[in-house]
Image (cartoon, rainbow, N blue to C red):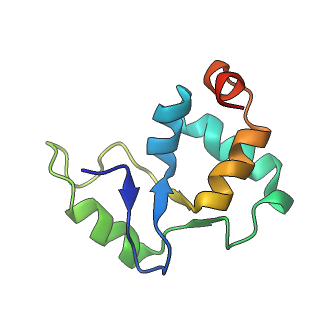
Amino acid sequence: MSLVESLSVPKPVIIDRDIAAFYDVETRVVNQAVKRNIERFPEEFCFQLTEKEFHDWKSQIVISNKEKMGLRKAPYAFTEQGVAMLSAVLKSETDVKIV
């Protein structure tokens, strides 16, 4: 499956767990960075999937535990601007190399 997911939004987005893997951090680190800097992430940059989007996204992934997939809540989706903003607030070795 491609890292970039096209959901019911007009722009391509990347899901929090994929961007976390890219930056070599845990997904919770990405989500904490967003919550601690929420004023930097307007809905055009980052949003949480709706229940329908979450269900549709999960149905596209084939893994053993299809019901939970290790997810307790809908993931965040980042637009290109959201990824750029995330790189400004994350503190990781990969982030330092990219910036």
Above-or-below relation of 1 to 59: above
How many numbered badges does the structure rendering display?
0
Q: In this rendered view, identify the residue nearer to me: 12 or 92.
A: 12
Residue extending farthest to the top is 93
Q: Seen in the image, is 92 located left or right of residue 13?
A: right
Above-or-below relation of 29 to 60: above
Which residue is found at the position 67% from the left and 65% from the top? 45
Q: Seen in the image, is 50 located left or right of residue 38?
A: left
Q: In this rendered view, identify the residue nearer to me: 84 or 77.
A: 84
Residue 46, picture quadrant: bottom right
Which residue is found at the position 16% from the left and 44% from the top? 63
Position of residue 93 measured from the top left corner of the image (x, y, whole percent): 66, 18
Position of residue 13 measured from the top left corner of the image (x, y, whole percent): 49, 62
Which residue is found at the position 63% from the left and 51% from the top? 83
Position of residue 49 measured from the top left corner of the image (x, y, whole percent): 49, 69
Quadrant position of the C terminus in the picture:
top right
Position of residue 44 measured from the top left corner of the image (x, y, whole percent): 67, 73
Residue 82 in sight from this viewpoint:
yes
Q: In this rendered view, identify the residue nearer to me: 36 or 4.
A: 4
Above-or-below relation of 51 to 87: below
Residue 73 in sight from this viewpoint:
no
Which residue is found at the position 29% from the left and 46% from the top? 69
